Image (cartoon, rainbow, N blue to C red):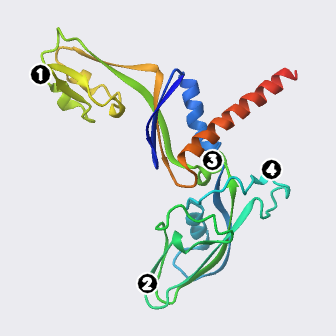
Amino acid sequence: MSIEIIEFNEKVKFIVKGINPTIANTIRRAILTEVPTMAIDYAVIIENTSVLYDEILLHRLSFIPLKTDLESYKLPEKCECGGSGCSNCQVRLYLEVEAEEGSLLVTSSHLVPEDGRTFPAKENIPIVKLEKGQKVILEAYARLGLGKEKAKWQPVAACAYKYFPIIEVNEQNCSLCEDCIERCPRKTLALVDNKIVLKNPLECSLCKECEKACPEGAIKVKYDDSCFIFKFENLGALPSDVIVEKALEAIVEKALELKRLLSSK
């Protein structure tokens, strides 16, 4: 197996060679569901005179990505308190905003964490717009969770993979009409040295529009079923490398647990 990193920041893209679709989907699911992150789980609404009901306000708060310190906090089920809520598995955030002079947009930047570390990953996420005289005062409680519980604990906005594309052109039949180039919605094909080539395989969606457009049937779209292009968008709770690392650790942990259970029979 080999890995080629194409992009690794907020947007992540990498190629994995030498695996099968089962392993590829396991990695995708682990990234989505097995990486712990912080998210607001419930809140005490002290005062809310905004246009939003308390439930809608809490729903918006719960989907704000929070910077996550995995060294300082534990999953509730693994905490000594048994998940009842303590400083080892839970953090409190305060929100106290009043529109005194005119309308005011309340954003994630108004959330203040008690521990001084669990800040929102983005400062400009809108929560509610207040008109003059309206206010919101609340205490929100965030805890670690997994994406398999609720989507608010997913560390990424989307995670997907696809087969690595292969374009085969029969040069004897190809008339270089360039119909395939014009039809390609991703503009991945090009004419180079009187040959049709796949200039950007990472953008090819395997839609086969080029195949349909070729009057001579000279072009065929195939794929390598042992090579996969992964991509996901990091929401900012954790660094991208930590997300991948924790996902792989979860896969190994489950495999070892399965091995232990089978060997005990």
Q: Residue furthest top?
A: 172
* Type of amino acid under label 4: Lys
Q: Are marks 3 and 4 in contact (CB under 8 Å)?
A: no
Q: Look at mark 2 in the image and give the residue it sits on.
A: 103
Q: Nearer the viewer, residue 114 or 145?
A: 114
Name the residue type under label 1.
Cys
Query: How much space separates mark 2 and mark 4, taking CA atoms?
Result: 44 Å
Q: Which residue is mark 3?
A: 147
At mark 2, the secondary structure is loop
Q: Quadrant of residue 67?
A: bottom right
> How far apart, in angstroms, are the residues tagged by discs 4 and 1?
64 Å
Mark 3 falls on what kind of element? loop
How packed is label 2: few (under 14 Cα within 10 Å), some, or many (20 or more)? Answer: some
Instruction: Name which of mark 4 and mark 1 comes first in the sequence.
Output: 4
Point out residue 174 in the picture as x, y percentages from the top left corner. 16, 14
Mark 3 or mark 4, earlier in chain = 4
Q: Amino acid at mark 2?
A: Ser
- The correct choice, above or below, for 9 with respect to 189 in the image is below
Separation of residues labelled 3 and 4 (CA atoms): 17 Å
Tag 4 residue:
78
Q: Secondary structure at mark 4?
A: helix
Q: Which residue is mark 1?
A: 177
Q: Which mark is residue 109?
A: none
